[in-house]
Image (cartoon, rainbow, N blue to C red):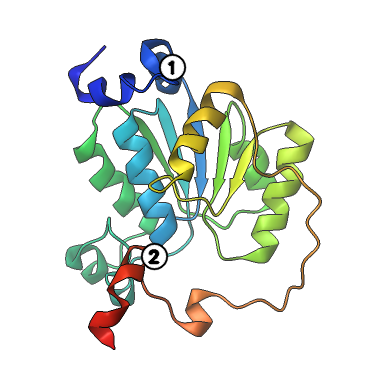
Amino acid sequence: MQERYARQVLFSRIGEMGQRKIREKHVLLIGAGALGAANAEALVRMGIGKLTIADRDYVEWSNLQRQQLYTEEDAQQCKPKAIAASEHLRKINSEVEIVSVVSDVTLQEMKELTKEVDLILDATDNFDTRLLINDISQKENIPWKLRCNVYNSSRENTMFSLLNGSSYGQCNMRYSRNHSTGCTNGRCSSSNRGDENIGG
């Protein structure tokens, strides 16, 4: 097993066999904003076999405060997030196959994107897209995780979903569509929760 994954392999619930399984898995990440970028980097560092990133948005200056993969150059070029993320991620781990999809996530698009996918990660703030992901997940029997963060305690859960096919989602979702997003209410980086006193 490669040295770069040595610490991960030492984790008893993964081991060398688990690491090989991770290397064989294909994850579909919907959304490449702050949460999506963090998840994408974690997946690439843990050695996922294939990562497909789908996002219709472009890098803006207002993203740089919290979306860790993007740079000023990306914002200057108004580069699609899926493409910018892929470029940076390939520099982190060239062994991972990364596919960029710059598109709205429609029903037809989801049918294409979910072919041969082992896990769907929902990093969106769009309720309609979330309902669509849930629907496809149930119909195609694909595990999915809702707004998880691979970097925190759920990182282990994401790994185990890859290893055993378990799912966080696949439920009947009934919520109000009168929801707010970071675009309407503003947002700080989730990693900055401990820095609240700096601004106070």
x%, y% of residue 121?
A: 54, 45
Is the residue marked by circle 2 packed among few (<14), some (14-19), or many (20+) residues within 10 Å? few
The relative height of residue 107 versus residue 138 in the rendered view (above or below) is: below
Query: How far apart are the two marked residues, 2 and 1, measured between alpha carbons?
Result: 29 Å
Counting every numbered tag in the picture gives: 2
Residue pointed to by mark 1:
18
x%, y% of residue 110?
A: 64, 44
Residue 105 appearing in the image: yes
Residue pointed to by mark 2:
190
x%, y% of residue 45?
A: 29, 35
What's under tag 2, amino acid-wise?
A: Ser
Of the 4 image quadrants, the one containing the C terminus is: bottom left
Q: Nearer the viewer, residue 138 or 160?
A: 160
The relative height of residue 18 versus residue 101 in the rendered view (above or below) is: above
- The answer to which image quadrant residue 126 occupies is bottom right
- The answer to which image quadrant residue 195 occupies is bottom left
User: Would residue 39 be found to the left or right of residue 104 on screen?
Assistant: left
Is the residue marked by circle 1 packed among few (<14), some (14-19), or many (20+) residues within 10 Å? many
**Badge 2 or badge 1: first in the primary sequence:** 1
Residue found at x 26% / y 23%: 5
- The answer to which image quadrant residue 48 occupies is top left
What's under tag 1, amino acid-wise?
A: Gly
Q: Nearer the viewer, residue 5 or 59?
A: 5
Residue 82 appearing in the image: no
